[in-house]
């Protein structure tokens, strides 16, 4: 499939980054990322819905509620999850280390961890690495930052947009990591998006939720949700442009651009799904409401039988039908359902479409990117998600992850 | 892992079987099974919850509601699902063929199909094979019957019990098929269990539901539910023993034996799960109620990340914790959770248990059969399910199924 190479990202005045090696695991790479945010910036975030959420998530939620965030510290290689009281203490010690290095308060630091669950964080190695990270903060380190937060990712994920608002250029840059444990409600991933617009906290809080709903909550690699996921949106306020009204044209323009960056990052995660060889959009049309449209789309996008058929390039539409039937839609009239593979109609009125040929279906399934469209004829709501296939490589990656 | 070889099954007076080749697919094997039930027998069934249920399921549901069932016709190789009006007509024509051969009414025949979805049934080949099947009906054909209904199964699945009730020996025999698309609410499978006890229809209707709840609704291979599944319980009434009271000791004894046969068949399906190398019991103790106990157990038993760790014999308890956190339990206090691998405690108070060693966990995960026990400390309800691992072979089987 087409590999999305990471773009080089523009600088966001008011945001500086630094990636350093801290030997979180026994590897030779940058695995610690420090992000510094200018005084007066707004920072919002959404976090994993997993009840077993990790220590850094608990600490970050508390700190972000207090406001006035000035720094983010992210480590790869260890999730600091299921680590109990010591895990919380470890996350707090990391915040203290950053606070000391930058001359701020520990509550102004948001900690994030990703990696193996259930092992204690090597806090001393992180504390030892923080001063070097603080000394090297710079605005053009996005690429190194995207690399430092990778775990099973095969490539860094970056996206950016610019948008002209009232004659001023607003810039948005973002990075993300994640390739497995991907599922909605904070898909298993970390994402950091920054803009130089000035956005008041309450508006930014709404914006991050809307952006995540349109992007990371619409992707699935394996249906599992991790303990550590987070998406952070930073508005540094370095430009003169202030977005103070959600009903303004400026807000609509900025939101569109920010959502685009989130979608690009979310799609990059699916394309880099563990072992993925295909990128598939599942579009559900004419559903009774948004919830049932998404449930149907995810039932298809998460079915191991559908995903192995995608891997085999086998247009086994019986499995699509099986998945739709499993979505739990009340009083579903299967006799009204149509299914299309790109523009090839494969199912009509619940059965094989007249004129459908295996060759036509095969031609679509042979592509590395295509769309499965289901028409339910129950209403007028349309939703879509993005998914990937389930390959031998997925099993290999996840069977060998800890070794 | 230990392969459960099919037992030879006892005869059930009042039940005769016949397996013949009908060339449903291009293969050399018996693929059509006819079961004849004596006049006056009671027959109950439960069917798939999939909204896209197959044509034979729709016909069988209608016929069983009318009562007085005398025959069952089961074909492997074609599911007759998502086949629209023609599928219904095809299923009805099969019933007519059986009715003609046995001198009964078409509505006294239950049709069942399993195999590829979305292709029309080769009805003429089935009709051509029915007379030979009818001519060869015999009581000791259980083994051939179990083989005739196999699809991706690697071995036939049979189970039997006898139970003494009031000095009389009651016999129970059953067969099942299924290896993929396994999930609760009529796990993807077909099962036929018969006893020579006499059980009134209303009692039998309750009994089949209770037996399925304790067996087939507690297994998972891949989280997918098929369009065709059914479990049928036949009480031929050939013995003098009549079970007429659900509060009697006789009912309790018979029920226990019937449930045991169902559990043995359900476990045989998991052990033959597509590509499975491990058989794992997931036990959830001290849950607030049965629903949350089962939800937690299935969240573990269906997680691709847990299942690939099982395949790798990797006691990656972080994935267990992740799955528990995803079960959606309200106000879950993760600090109270314990996890055991057989009798090795791996998690205590939500974190790694003191004294746990990788070696001890590894020794359990190296076994082909073991139990994962989760203690939630939220109440006093315990539930269990059975699952298997997710292997390379699963991907291979499902990627190549139609070829």
Image (tube, coloured by chain):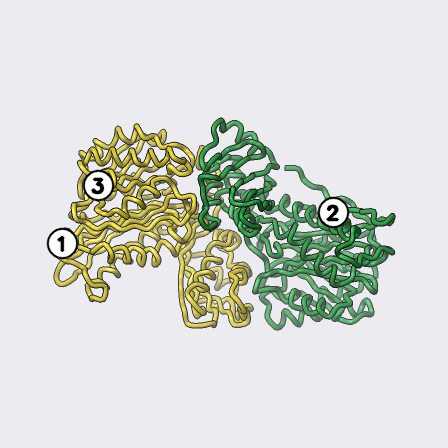
Chain colours: A yellow, B green
Q: Is residue A88 visible?
A: yes
Sequence-wise, which precedes: disc 1 or disc 3? 3
Pick the front one: A271 or A381: A381
Q: Is residue A53 above or below residue A83?
A: below
What is the x, y in percent for residue B106? 75, 71
Chain where mark 3 sits: A
Q: Which residue is mark 2?
A: B159
Q: Secondary structure at mark 1?
A: loop
Tags 3 and 2 both on a single chain? no
Q: Secondary structure at mark 2?
A: strand
Distance between the alpha carbons at the discs numbered 3 and 2: 65 Å
Q: Is residue A396 visible?
A: no
B179 relative to A138 in the view: left or right: right
Q: Which residue is mark 3?
A: A17
Q: Which residue is mark 1?
A: A239
| Label 3, residues with CA under 10 Å away: few <14, some 14-19, many ≥20 | many
Distance between the alpha carbons at the discs numbered 2 and 1: 75 Å
What is the x, y in percent for residue B387? 58, 45
């Amino acid at each position: 499939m087409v590999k999305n190479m990471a773009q080089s990202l523009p600088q966001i005045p008011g945001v500086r980054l630094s990636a350093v090696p801290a030997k979180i695991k026994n590897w030779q790479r940058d695995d610690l990322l420090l992000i510094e945010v200018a005084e007066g910036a707004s920072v919002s975030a959404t976090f994993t819905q997993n009840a077993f959420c990790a220590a850094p998530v608990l600490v970050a939620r508390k700190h972000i509620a207090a406001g006035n965030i000035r720094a983010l510290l992210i480590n790869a290689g260890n999730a600091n999850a299921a680590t109990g009281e010591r895990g919380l203490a470890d996350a707090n010690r990391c915040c203290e280390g950053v606070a000391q290095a930058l001359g701020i308060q520990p509550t102004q630091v948001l900690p994030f961890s990703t990696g193996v669950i259930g092992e204690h964080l090597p806090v001393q190695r992180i504390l030892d690495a923080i001063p070097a990270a603080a000394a090297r903060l710079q605005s053009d380190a996005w690429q190194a930052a995207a690399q430092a937060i990778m775990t099973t990712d095969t490539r860094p994920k970056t996206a950016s947009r610019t948008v002209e608002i009232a004659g001023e250029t607003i810039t948005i840059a973002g990075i993300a990591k994640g390739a497995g444990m991907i599922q909605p409600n904070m898909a298993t991933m970390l994402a950091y998006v920054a803009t130089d617009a000035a956005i008041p906290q309450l508006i930014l809080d709404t914006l991050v939720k809307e952006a995540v709903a349109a992007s990371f909550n619409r992707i699935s690699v394996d249906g599992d949700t991790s303990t550590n996921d987070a998406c952070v949106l930073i508005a540094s306020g370095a430009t003169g442009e202030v977005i103070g009204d959600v009903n303004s044209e400026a807000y609509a323009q900025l939101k569109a651009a920010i959502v685009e960056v989130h979608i690009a990052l979310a799609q990059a995660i699916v394309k880099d799904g563990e072992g993925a060889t295909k990128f598939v959009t599942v579009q559900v049309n004419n559903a009774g409401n948004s919830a049932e449209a998404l449930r149907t789309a995810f039932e298809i996008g998460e079915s191991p039988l559908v995903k192995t058929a995608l891997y085999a390039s086998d247009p086994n539409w019986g499995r699509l039908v099986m998945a739709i039937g499993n979505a739990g839609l009340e009083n579903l009239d299967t006799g009204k359902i149509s299914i299309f593979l790109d523009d090839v109609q494969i199912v009509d009125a619940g059965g094989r479409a007249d004129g459908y040929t295996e060759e036509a279906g095969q031609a679509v399934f042979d592509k590395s990117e295509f769309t499965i469209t289901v028409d339910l004829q129950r209403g007028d709501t349309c939703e879509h998600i993005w998914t990937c296939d389930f390959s031998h490589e997925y099993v290999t990656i996840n069977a060998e992850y800890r070794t």
